[in-house]
Each structure stands twice: as C-alpha cells, then as structure tokens.
Amino acid sequence: MKLRIIFAIVFMLYGINVQAKILLQRFDKSAFYAVIKSGNKDEIDNELNLVTASSINEKEAYEGFLLMRKAGLTGKASEKLKLFKAGRIKLETALLNDDNNAEYHFLRLIIEEKAPKIVKYHNDLDTDKRIIIKSYKNLPEVVQQAIIDYSKNSKILHSQDF
C-alpha cells in the first residue's frame, strides 16, 4: 500500500514538472515556423504541447495545422486519418472565425499543397494564394519570411508573387 502511494506521488510530481516546463516556455512564432520547416515529428509534438498549453489567439489554427502536419509523419493509416480530421476541423473553424487572416490561409495552403489526393483537401488553393498575396505586406515579418522560405519550394506560391 505504501509503495503504491509513493509511486502515485512520484508520477504526480513528474507530471507537474513536465507541465511546468511547458507553461514556462513562451510561444515563439519564429520557432513555430522553424518546426514546420524541420518536419521533425518530435519537434512537432513539442510545439503542439506548447501551443495547446498557451493562450494565444491563433491557438486553434496552429493546433489544427500541427495535427495535420503530424498526420503526414505518422506511420499507421488509421492514426493518420484521425489526426488529419481533428486538425482539419480546428484549422477550418479558425478560418470560419477569421476568414481574413492571411496567416491561416497560408497554413492551409501548406497542407493543401502536400495533402494526398485521397483526403480531398485541395479546393481552396487558388483562394488561399490570392489572399496571401493580397495581404502579404500587412503580415508580421516572421510570417512574411516563412512565406518567402516556403515559396522557394512551392508549386503554388512563387517568390516573384511578393
């Protein structure tokens, strides 16, 4: 009985320590885009935990994007679909709530361009591209840089568009 109590306390303290570390980290948009660029599943998981624990305005869009990005890096097909659907709901909800947010359209364009045809997530490529180009100059510098970096390898966005 005493051993169970000791184990319970140790696990509880470990959980508190992990959550404290996540809460102490501050969300950094440039780090978010660096994680996206890396495509590393562990880094995406860490960023997802950070975003989930944060209270930033873009939380739902970022969570949705990270879930869909993680889906592309997961091995099991059923898990891929589950993550993609959950992420899609979050990102699309964020877009419904703030349809003029060009950064959200950029995040969706990244997923749309790389999503397999079977998920049928390619319908808004032209709209997203148009909104991103139109609003580019009004976006924060870190987002502008992410767009320029992405456009170097994109078939949809091109650096001369900006």
Image: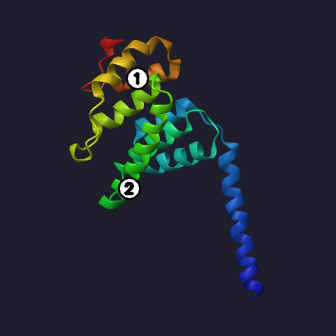
Q: Residue at (45%, 21%) from the top-left corner?
A: 145
Q: Residue at (24%, 26%) from the top-left corner?
A: 155
In the rendered structure, which amino acid carries the disc numbered 1? Ile
Residue 147 horizontal side relative to residue 47, left or right: left
Above or below — where is 137 with respect to 59?
A: above
Name the residue beneath numbered marker 1: 147
Residue 38 image position (x, y, % from top left):
42, 39
Residue at far bottom of view: 1
Front-most of residues 67 and 73: 67
Residue 63 image position (x, y, % from top left):
50, 43
Residue 127 horizontal side relative to residue 142, left or right: left
- Choose mark 2 or mark 1, whichever is in front: 2
- Quick one: quadrant of the C terminus? top left
N-term mark: 2 or 1: 2
Q: CA distance from mark 2 to mark 1?
A: 28 Å
Residue 76 in view = no
Give the secondary structure at mark 1.
helix
Residue 138 image position (x, y, % from top left):
50, 13
Front-most of residues 120 and 112: 120
Give the secondary structure at mark 2.
helix
Crowd around label 2: few <14 · some 14–19 · many ≥20 (10 Å) = some
Name the residue beneath numbered marker 2: 82
Crowd around label 1: few <14 · some 14–19 · many ≥20 (10 Å) = many
Q: Residue at (75%, 88%) from the top-left corner?
A: 1
Residue 24 in view = yes
Residue 110 horizontal side relative to residue 18, left or right: left
Above or below — where is 64 with respect to 7?
A: above
Residue at far front of view: 96
In the rendered structure, which amino acid carries the disc numbered 2? Lys
Q: Residue at (67%, 62%) from the top-left corner?
A: 15
